[in-house]
Amino acid sequence: MTVSRKKAIELLEDEAGDVTRLFEKPVGQWKLALRRFRGRRSGMTGLFIVVGLILVALFAPLIAPYEPNEILIGVEDVGRRDPPCIHVLGCPDETPQHIMGIDGNVRDVFSRIVYGSRVSLTLGFFTVTLALVVGSTIGAISGYAGGWIDNILMRIMDVILGFPSLLLAIAIVAVLGPGLRNALLAIAIVTLPGYARVMRAQVLAIKENDYVTASRALGSSTREILLKRIIPNALTPLVVLATLGVATAILEAAGLSFLGLGAQPPDAEWGSMLARERNQVFTSPHLVFFPGIAIMLTVLGFNLMGDGMRDALDPTLNR
Amino acid sequence: MISYITRRTLLAIPVLIGIVVVVFLLVRAIPGDPCTAILGEQATEAACERFNEANGLNESLPIQLAVYIKNVFTFNLGDSISFSRPVTQMLIERLPLTAELALSALFLAVVVGVPLGILAARRHNSVVDTATMAFANVGVSMPVFWLGLMLAYLFALVLRDTPFVLPPSGRLSPGVFPMAYYDVWGWELTEGSTWAKFNEYLANHFILNSLVTGQWDVFWDAVKHMILPAVALATIPLSIIARITRSSLLEVMGKDYIRTARAKGASEGSVVRGHALRNSMLAVVTIIGLQLGALLGGAILTETVFNLAGVGRSLFEAITARDYAVVQGFTVVIAGIYVVVNLLVDLSYAYLDPRIRLE
């Protein structure tokens, strides 16, 4: 087989590259993980969906043709619950274009869906941050202290896990009163045990390491050992759990809103948009269809991204 | 094995007591008192005084709690304030619906999910695998209530003139009445006895009741009403079960003893059936148990969408109405079922994997 001169040089260069690579700085675990993550189609799909949603939420006023709560009676020639009208798909030019139709209060559904991304993303982010911070603190204390403190904290977590999560969330919202902020708190509480348990398991494994003993021998305080030695090394699985947790939080919040316990009208929130029009599903299915698709797409994005991250960060899957 | 069962069972008791206490306190913490919630306009001070006296709400909290715990363990769950009926009677009427719904959904999820997972694992990285996993990823991301409404729209409206039409709400069509098996078989039951109540509870499982007594018209009607809610409720667990089956089977198939089995000349089918499946089922059994909690939570949403008077829906309404006894009773029963199922999962885990018993 003859190889062209140019190709031969390229091959040689590649080989040289391989050799010189041996003398390069070793690649860190995060860089390796990033490389693995980029190689996975589903993880990248998730990342694209999530980034796309963040962009939609950030630039909502530029994307949405109307204000989310703008009532179009007298503004345009549209009626209550008009079906979608898309000009390129054959809707007559004289009818105003509303690609997802009009809702029961004569508002543009597409604009409300676009603004709804802000509500869902904010809610997902804050719920998970709260659950992550409180849950992993409980887990870290439990795992590091051991003994009766560990026992009490973990039994409390068991009781929370003893309830179906939506049921407990409903009860908590009933106590605190309906509304988005209380729904957020309730979901954070019912998802606490997951973070606490994972953090505890991590701490139990890490605290036996020599570098922790060394740190203690050097006279570090418990606080210092936990914050500087143990927690930074325990974070990897929690990052994955948190990403998947955003998906769960958004889904549960939509469920609470559907039952009338989350977002209150006139907030443009997907779950409550769907709930308000659910009895119209046989006459105006578009009012139920689009908010559901929005929820599904968001949850799917975070699920795929979380799965991709788990595969990328798990060194045992190094094949 | 026996010491493992005892140890594991004893561990469940503090959790159960914790649940009873948490429910009790949560219900008491709901703002607004039951008197104003029930009596409304007529809630004068004197009327409320009598109301609280009659319902034992004048006692201090610890005493109310002690009375309540005693009652729970003697199966006396009190009376519903808004329906003026014993909570046990309401459970007899409403729990069977939720049980049938959750079990049908779980059945669907296992019967479809496990084979799908096995198929995806056997054809790893093929089109079948990719399609199954894409389906599972979408399935796990769908809101139950949205899927329910869309299924109702599709099967009750779009397909209404085809043989595939299915009812969008309710448990039976109007005019269809199931006859309890004890009436069919002419049993003599004493009105109000525990045995009669137990039989009434069993007979309220319409699908089961009409199946054993051969009332086929009732059976088909009940099954038809159950399909859409069960499919909606099953989607998430089905997807999760398919994923876990696939990944756990793939992991086992990479083990040395599988290579040994192949090396000794065993056929691919007998390698999978004889060596891989049982070992990969450990993870699947755990997940199936854990899904029950999700099913009971999802039942609240599914029952709302399909207008079914089950435990989930009633519980939600009782919370809004501050019906203490119903909220407490139903929650304790649901959480109790959940704890028992998790216990059974742990025990079956120990049965499947002898190493666990020895820990």
Image (cartoon, coloured by chain):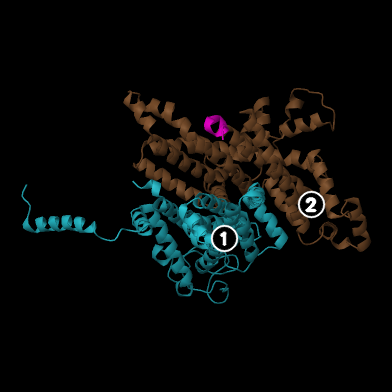
Chain colours: A cyan, B brown
Query: Which corner quadrant holds the C terminus of chain B?
Result: top right
Check residue B324 in the rendering and tell me which mark sits there, or answer none.
2
Q: Residues within 10 Å of mark 1 (few under 14, many from 20)?
A: few
Query: Which corner quadrant holds the N terminus of chain B?
Result: top right
The kind of secondary structure element at disc 1 is helix
Q: Is residue A182 above or below residue B176?
A: below
The kind of secondary structure element at disc 2 is helix
Asked if residue B71 lies left or right of residue A113, the reply is: right
* Residue at screen point 48% across, 73% down: A65
x, y percent for residue B256: 37, 32
Instruction: Give the total of numbered labels.
Output: 2
Decide which of B208, A31 is in the foreground and name it: A31
Letter of the chain that mark 1 sits on in the rendering = A
Q: Is residue A240 above or below residue B259?
A: below
Real-space Cα distance between discs 1 and 2?
45 Å
Q: Residues within 10 Å of mark 2 (few under 14, many from 20)?
A: many
Which range is magenta? B350-359
Question: Is residue B34 one of those drawn in magenta?
Answer: no
Question: Is residue B358 one of those drawn in magenta?
Answer: yes
x, y percent for residue A72: 56, 73
Asked if residue B186 lies left or right of residue A277, the reply is: right
Decide which of A296, A230 is in the foreground and name it: A230
x, y percent for residue A2: 5, 50
Q: Nearer the viewer, mark 1 or mark 2?
A: 1
Q: Which amino acid type is shown beneath numbered disc 1? A: Thr
* Residue at the spot of label 1: A222
Q: Is residue A123 above or below residue B8?
A: below
Residue B231, picture quadrant: top right
Check residue A23 in the rendering and tell me which mark sits there, or answer none.
none
